Image (cartoon, rainbow, N blue to C red):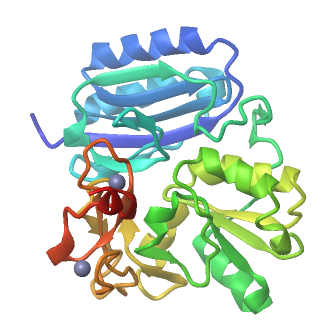
Amino acid sequence: MSEPKILLYYVFAPVADPEAVRLWQRELCESLGLRGRIIVSPHGINGTVGGELDACKQYLRRTREYPPFAALEPKWSEGTALVDAPEERLHGVERGARWQRITDFPRLSVKVRDELVAFGIPNETRVDSDGVVGGGVHLSPQEVNDLVAERGDEVVFFDGRNAWEAEIGRFAGAVVPSTRTTHDFIAQIDAGDFDDLKGRPVVTYCTGGIRCEILSAAMRTRGFDEVYQIDGGIVKYGEAFGNDGLWEGSLAVFDGREALDFAPGAAVIGRCRVCGAPSNAVSNCSDPACTHRFVVCDAHAGSPCEEHAQAA
Ligand SMILES: [Zn+2]
Ligand SMILES: [Zn+2]
Protein backbone atom coordinates (compact mmCIF):
# COMPACT_ATOMS: atom_id res chain seq x y z
CA MET A 1 0.00 0.00 0.00
CA SER A 2 1.31 3.42 -0.90
CA GLU A 3 1.54 6.16 1.68
CA PRO A 4 -1.99 6.84 2.87
CA LYS A 5 -3.61 10.23 2.60
CA ILE A 6 -5.89 11.79 5.15
CA LEU A 7 -8.84 14.07 4.66
CA LEU A 8 -9.70 16.41 7.53
CA TYR A 9 -12.91 18.32 7.22
CA TYR A 10 -16.03 19.68 8.79
CA VAL A 11 -19.14 21.19 7.31
CA PHE A 12 -21.82 23.00 9.28
CA ALA A 13 -25.10 22.57 7.39
CA PRO A 14 -28.55 21.28 8.34
CA VAL A 15 -28.74 17.47 8.18
CA ALA A 16 -32.37 16.38 8.23
CA ASP A 17 -31.74 12.69 8.90
CA PRO A 18 -28.38 12.12 10.62
CA GLU A 19 -29.00 8.39 11.02
CA ALA A 20 -29.49 7.94 7.28
CA VAL A 21 -26.32 9.93 6.62
CA ARG A 22 -24.44 7.77 9.13
CA LEU A 23 -25.48 4.57 7.35
CA TRP A 24 -24.59 6.03 3.96
CA GLN A 25 -21.19 7.26 5.16
CA ARG A 26 -20.36 3.94 6.80
CA GLU A 27 -21.18 2.02 3.66
CA LEU A 28 -19.27 4.48 1.49
CA CYS A 29 -16.13 4.25 3.65
CA GLU A 30 -16.32 0.47 3.88
CA SER A 31 -16.68 0.12 0.12
CA LEU A 32 -13.60 2.32 -0.39
CA GLY A 33 -11.51 0.74 2.35
CA LEU A 34 -11.22 3.97 4.33
CA ARG A 35 -10.83 4.15 8.08
CA GLY A 36 -11.05 6.98 10.54
CA ARG A 37 -13.73 8.80 12.46
CA ILE A 38 -16.83 10.57 11.33
CA ILE A 39 -19.39 12.35 13.48
CA VAL A 40 -22.75 13.27 12.00
CA SER A 41 -25.17 15.58 13.78
CA PRO A 42 -28.19 17.65 12.84
CA HIS A 43 -25.65 20.50 12.49
CA GLY A 44 -23.39 18.85 9.94
CA ILE A 45 -20.47 16.46 9.68
CA ASN A 46 -16.92 16.28 11.03
CA GLY A 47 -14.50 13.70 9.73
CA THR A 48 -10.94 12.49 9.58
CA VAL A 49 -10.67 9.64 7.13
CA GLY A 50 -7.61 8.03 5.64
CA GLY A 51 -6.74 5.58 2.92
CA GLU A 52 -5.40 5.28 -0.63
CA LEU A 53 -5.34 8.49 -2.65
CA ASP A 54 -7.89 7.28 -5.21
CA ALA A 55 -10.24 6.11 -2.47
CA CYS A 56 -9.99 9.50 -0.75
CA LYS A 57 -10.79 11.27 -4.01
CA GLN A 58 -13.79 9.07 -4.63
CA TYR A 59 -14.96 9.57 -1.07
CA LEU A 60 -14.78 13.31 -1.53
CA ARG A 61 -16.68 13.27 -4.80
CA ARG A 62 -19.45 11.06 -3.47
CA THR A 63 -19.79 12.97 -0.21
CA ARG A 64 -20.12 16.28 -2.05
CA GLU A 65 -23.01 14.83 -4.05
CA TYR A 66 -25.14 15.22 -0.93
CA PRO A 67 -26.27 18.87 -1.28
CA PRO A 68 -25.65 19.99 2.33
CA PHE A 69 -22.02 18.83 1.95
CA ALA A 70 -21.47 20.25 -1.56
CA ALA A 71 -19.09 22.92 -0.27
CA LEU A 72 -16.91 20.48 1.68
CA GLU A 73 -13.29 21.68 1.45
CA PRO A 74 -11.00 19.21 3.17
CA LYS A 75 -7.48 19.70 4.36
CA TRP A 76 -5.31 17.04 2.72
CA SER A 77 -2.63 15.54 4.84
CA GLU A 78 0.03 12.86 4.59
CA GLY A 79 -0.62 9.62 6.40
CA THR A 80 1.78 10.50 9.16
CA ALA A 81 0.32 13.91 9.78
CA LEU A 82 -1.55 14.78 12.91
CA VAL A 83 -5.28 14.89 12.51
CA ASP A 84 -8.00 16.43 14.59
CA ALA A 85 -10.07 13.91 16.51
CA PRO A 86 -12.68 15.83 18.44
CA GLU A 87 -14.67 14.43 21.29
CA GLU A 88 -12.84 11.20 21.68
CA ARG A 89 -13.38 9.30 24.85
CA LEU A 90 -10.32 8.55 26.90
CA HIS A 91 -10.58 6.63 30.14
CA GLY A 92 -14.32 6.91 29.64
CA VAL A 93 -14.30 10.67 30.04
CA GLU A 94 -15.30 12.94 27.23
CA ARG A 95 -12.66 15.45 26.25
CA GLY A 96 -12.31 18.25 23.81
CA ALA A 97 -10.66 17.84 20.48
CA ARG A 98 -7.26 16.25 20.50
CA TRP A 99 -4.84 15.19 17.86
CA GLN A 100 -4.04 11.73 16.79
CA ARG A 101 -2.08 9.97 14.11
CA ILE A 102 -3.93 8.15 11.37
CA THR A 103 -1.88 5.07 12.22
CA ASP A 104 -3.69 5.05 15.55
CA PHE A 105 -7.03 4.61 13.83
CA PRO A 106 -7.82 1.00 14.58
CA ARG A 107 -10.93 0.96 12.48
CA LEU A 108 -13.78 2.93 11.04
CA SER A 109 -16.09 4.76 13.43
CA VAL A 110 -19.16 6.61 12.20
CA LYS A 111 -21.41 8.02 14.91
CA VAL A 112 -24.40 10.25 15.32
CA ARG A 113 -24.14 12.84 18.09
CA ASP A 114 -26.38 15.74 18.95
CA GLU A 115 -23.43 18.16 18.57
CA LEU A 116 -20.29 18.09 16.43
CA VAL A 117 -18.39 19.51 19.42
CA ALA A 118 -19.73 18.75 22.89
CA PHE A 119 -20.32 22.22 24.29
CA GLY A 120 -23.59 21.04 25.79
CA ILE A 121 -25.79 23.48 23.80
CA PRO A 122 -27.25 21.28 21.04
CA ASN A 123 -30.58 23.10 21.02
CA GLU A 124 -29.04 26.56 21.00
CA THR A 125 -26.77 26.00 17.99
CA ARG A 126 -28.44 26.89 14.70
CA VAL A 127 -27.07 26.20 11.26
CA ASP A 128 -28.21 27.07 7.77
CA SER A 129 -26.70 26.48 4.35
CA ASP A 130 -24.04 29.13 5.10
CA GLY A 131 -22.89 27.38 8.28
CA VAL A 132 -23.35 28.29 11.94
CA VAL A 133 -25.79 31.17 12.37
CA GLY A 134 -24.41 34.11 14.36
CA GLY A 135 -20.79 32.98 14.60
CA GLY A 136 -17.78 35.27 14.89
CA VAL A 137 -16.37 36.97 11.81
CA HIS A 138 -13.80 34.75 10.07
CA LEU A 139 -10.33 36.23 9.78
CA SER A 140 -7.45 34.94 7.69
CA PRO A 141 -4.09 34.77 9.50
CA GLN A 142 -3.06 38.05 7.86
CA GLU A 143 -6.33 39.70 8.90
CA VAL A 144 -5.65 38.66 12.49
CA ASN A 145 -2.36 40.55 12.37
CA ASP A 146 -4.02 43.52 10.67
CA LEU A 147 -6.67 43.70 13.39
CA VAL A 148 -4.02 43.76 16.11
CA ALA A 149 -1.95 46.33 14.20
CA GLU A 150 -5.01 48.56 13.99
CA ARG A 151 -6.54 48.12 17.43
CA GLY A 152 -3.50 47.21 19.54
CA ASP A 153 -3.99 46.09 23.13
CA GLU A 154 -7.72 46.45 22.82
CA VAL A 155 -7.77 43.10 20.96
CA VAL A 156 -7.98 40.05 23.20
CA PHE A 157 -7.31 36.46 22.14
CA PHE A 158 -9.60 33.89 23.73
CA ASP A 159 -8.40 30.28 23.89
CA GLY A 160 -11.14 27.85 22.85
CA ARG A 161 -9.22 24.73 23.85
CA ASN A 162 -8.85 22.87 27.09
CA ALA A 163 -6.61 24.75 29.50
CA TRP A 164 -3.76 22.23 29.48
CA GLU A 165 -3.28 22.76 25.75
CA ALA A 166 -2.58 26.46 26.32
CA GLU A 167 0.14 25.80 28.90
CA ILE A 168 2.73 25.19 26.17
CA GLY A 169 1.45 27.48 23.45
CA ARG A 170 -1.01 30.32 23.00
CA PHE A 171 -1.49 33.67 21.36
CA ALA A 172 0.31 36.55 23.04
CA GLY A 173 -1.66 37.77 26.03
CA ALA A 174 -4.49 35.29 25.48
CA VAL A 175 -7.27 34.73 27.99
CA VAL A 176 -7.25 31.03 28.87
CA PRO A 177 -10.44 29.76 30.53
CA SER A 178 -9.81 27.09 33.16
CA THR A 179 -11.53 24.39 31.16
CA ARG A 180 -10.97 20.67 31.33
CA THR A 181 -13.53 19.85 28.64
CA THR A 182 -15.50 21.88 26.13
CA HIS A 183 -18.50 21.53 28.46
CA ASP A 184 -16.86 23.97 30.90
CA PHE A 185 -16.87 26.99 28.58
CA ILE A 186 -20.55 27.82 28.68
CA ALA A 187 -20.77 27.56 32.46
CA GLN A 188 -17.85 29.96 32.92
CA ILE A 189 -19.20 32.42 30.38
CA ASP A 190 -22.65 32.27 31.97
CA ALA A 191 -21.09 32.85 35.40
CA GLY A 192 -19.75 36.18 34.11
CA ASP A 193 -16.06 35.19 34.31
CA PHE A 194 -15.28 37.07 31.10
CA ASP A 195 -17.78 39.93 31.27
CA ASP A 196 -14.92 42.46 31.29
CA LEU A 197 -14.17 41.46 27.68
CA LYS A 198 -17.62 42.31 26.40
CA GLY A 199 -16.73 45.72 24.99
CA ARG A 200 -13.54 44.53 23.30
CA PRO A 201 -12.66 42.82 20.01
CA VAL A 202 -12.35 39.13 20.96
CA VAL A 203 -10.50 36.69 18.69
CA THR A 204 -11.40 33.10 19.55
CA TYR A 205 -9.02 30.38 18.44
CA CYS A 206 -8.61 26.61 18.64
CA THR A 207 -6.53 23.94 16.95
CA GLY A 208 -8.28 23.64 13.59
CA GLY A 209 -11.22 26.03 13.88
CA ILE A 210 -14.21 23.76 14.50
CA ARG A 211 -14.58 24.53 18.21
CA CYS A 212 -14.66 28.29 17.58
CA GLU A 213 -17.48 27.98 15.07
CA ILE A 214 -19.70 27.07 18.03
CA LEU A 215 -17.91 28.99 20.78
CA SER A 216 -17.91 32.31 18.92
CA ALA A 217 -21.65 32.04 18.25
CA ALA A 218 -22.32 31.18 21.90
CA MET A 219 -20.30 34.23 23.00
CA ARG A 220 -22.16 36.56 20.67
CA THR A 221 -25.47 35.21 21.98
CA ARG A 222 -24.23 36.04 25.49
CA GLY A 223 -23.45 39.69 24.87
CA PHE A 224 -19.94 39.75 23.41
CA ASP A 225 -20.60 41.98 20.46
CA GLU A 226 -17.32 41.98 18.54
CA VAL A 227 -16.19 38.37 18.13
CA TYR A 228 -13.82 36.93 15.54
CA GLN A 229 -12.52 33.45 14.74
CA ILE A 230 -9.45 32.36 12.79
CA ASP A 231 -9.96 30.51 9.52
CA GLY A 232 -8.29 27.13 9.93
CA GLY A 233 -7.39 27.87 13.55
CA ILE A 234 -3.91 27.75 15.04
CA VAL A 235 -2.75 25.26 12.42
CA LYS A 236 -3.34 27.64 9.52
CA TYR A 237 -2.00 30.63 11.44
CA GLY A 238 1.15 28.72 12.38
CA GLU A 239 1.67 27.55 8.83
CA ALA A 240 1.43 31.16 7.68
CA PHE A 241 3.68 32.84 10.24
CA GLY A 242 5.76 30.18 12.03
CA ASN A 243 7.42 31.81 15.04
CA ASP A 244 7.20 35.29 13.53
CA GLY A 245 3.57 36.08 14.27
CA LEU A 246 1.48 36.50 17.41
CA TRP A 247 1.50 32.79 18.28
CA GLU A 248 3.96 31.80 21.01
CA GLY A 249 5.23 28.33 21.83
CA SER A 250 4.14 24.88 20.68
CA LEU A 251 0.87 23.34 19.59
CA ALA A 252 -0.30 20.63 21.98
CA VAL A 253 -0.89 17.29 20.30
CA PHE A 254 -2.36 14.02 21.41
CA ASP A 255 0.72 12.16 22.55
CA GLY A 256 1.70 13.77 25.85
CA ARG A 257 5.40 13.81 25.02
CA GLU A 258 4.85 15.41 21.67
CA ALA A 259 4.22 18.97 20.70
CA LEU A 260 4.17 20.50 17.27
CA ASP A 261 6.42 23.48 16.52
CA PHE A 262 5.69 25.54 13.43
CA ALA A 263 9.37 26.33 12.96
CA PRO A 264 12.63 25.49 14.71
CA GLY A 265 13.36 27.63 17.73
CA ALA A 266 9.79 28.05 18.96
CA ALA A 267 9.59 29.65 22.40
CA VAL A 268 9.27 27.26 25.34
CA ILE A 269 6.61 28.88 27.51
CA GLY A 270 5.47 25.88 29.56
CA ARG A 271 6.80 25.24 33.06
CA CYS A 272 7.12 21.84 34.72
CA ARG A 273 4.32 21.44 37.26
CA VAL A 274 6.78 19.76 39.66
CA CYS A 275 10.01 21.78 39.46
CA GLY A 276 9.23 24.82 37.32
CA ALA A 277 11.80 24.07 34.63
CA PRO A 278 10.94 25.25 31.10
CA SER A 279 9.31 22.48 29.07
CA ASN A 280 6.88 22.06 26.19
CA ALA A 281 6.01 18.45 27.07
CA VAL A 282 2.52 17.58 28.31
CA SER A 283 1.94 14.32 30.12
CA ASN A 284 -0.90 12.36 31.64
CA CYS A 285 -1.20 11.93 35.39
CA SER A 286 0.55 8.70 36.46
CA ASP A 287 -2.76 7.43 37.84
CA PRO A 288 -4.27 5.57 34.87
CA ALA A 289 -7.81 6.43 35.94
CA CYS A 290 -7.03 10.18 36.10
CA THR A 291 -7.62 12.41 33.09
CA HIS A 292 -5.47 15.35 34.18
CA ARG A 293 -2.82 16.52 31.73
CA PHE A 294 -0.10 18.98 32.60
CA VAL A 295 3.39 20.17 31.70
CA VAL A 296 6.41 18.22 32.97
CA CYS A 297 10.14 18.32 32.29
CA ASP A 298 12.00 15.17 31.18
CA ALA A 299 12.99 14.34 34.76
CA HIS A 300 9.39 14.53 35.99
CA ALA A 301 7.62 12.69 33.18
CA GLY A 302 5.15 10.21 34.64
CA SER A 303 4.45 12.22 37.80
CA PRO A 304 1.05 12.26 39.48
CA CYS A 305 -1.13 15.37 39.28
CA GLU A 306 -1.47 17.56 42.38
CA GLU A 307 -4.58 15.73 43.54
CA HIS A 308 -3.01 12.32 43.26
CA ALA A 309 0.32 13.42 44.72
CA GLN A 310 -1.53 14.48 47.88
CA ALA A 311 -3.44 11.23 48.00
CA ALA A 312 -0.25 9.17 47.70
ZN1 LIG B 1 10.52 19.06 36.48
ZN1 LIG C 1 -4.33 12.65 38.71
Q: Which of the pair 234/278 is nearer the observer?
A: 278
Residue lying furthest front in this view? Answer: 311
Q: Is residue 237 above or below residue 131?
A: below
Asked which quadrant contains residue 5, the reply is top left
- Tell me: 4 left or right of 55: left
Q: Nearer the viewer, residue 206 or 90?
A: 90
* Count of all numbered marks drawn on residues in the image: 0
Quarter in which the N terminus is drawn? top left
The answer to whether one can see residue 137 in this image is yes
Q: Residue at x 20, y 72 (%)?
A: 300
Residue 205 is left or right of residue 262, and the answer is right
* Residue at the image position 38 percent from the left and 79 percent from the top: 270
Quadrant holding ligand 2?
Answer: bottom left
**Residue pushed farthest left?**
1
Residue drawn 54% across the image and 14% down it: 21
Q: Quadrant of residue 27?
A: top left
- Residue 26 percent across, percent down from the top left: 40, 15
Residue 218 x %, y %: 78, 49
Residue situated in front as seen by the camera: 206 or 29: 206
Position of 194 compared to 234: left or right?
Answer: right
Which is nearer the eye, 272 or 175? 272
Quadrant in the picture for the C terminus: bottom left
Residue 231: percent from the left, percent from the top? 60, 60
Q: Is residue 247 above or below residue 307?
A: below
Is residue 235 visible in the rendered image? The answer is no
Q: Position of residue 134 (x, y in %)?
A: 83, 48
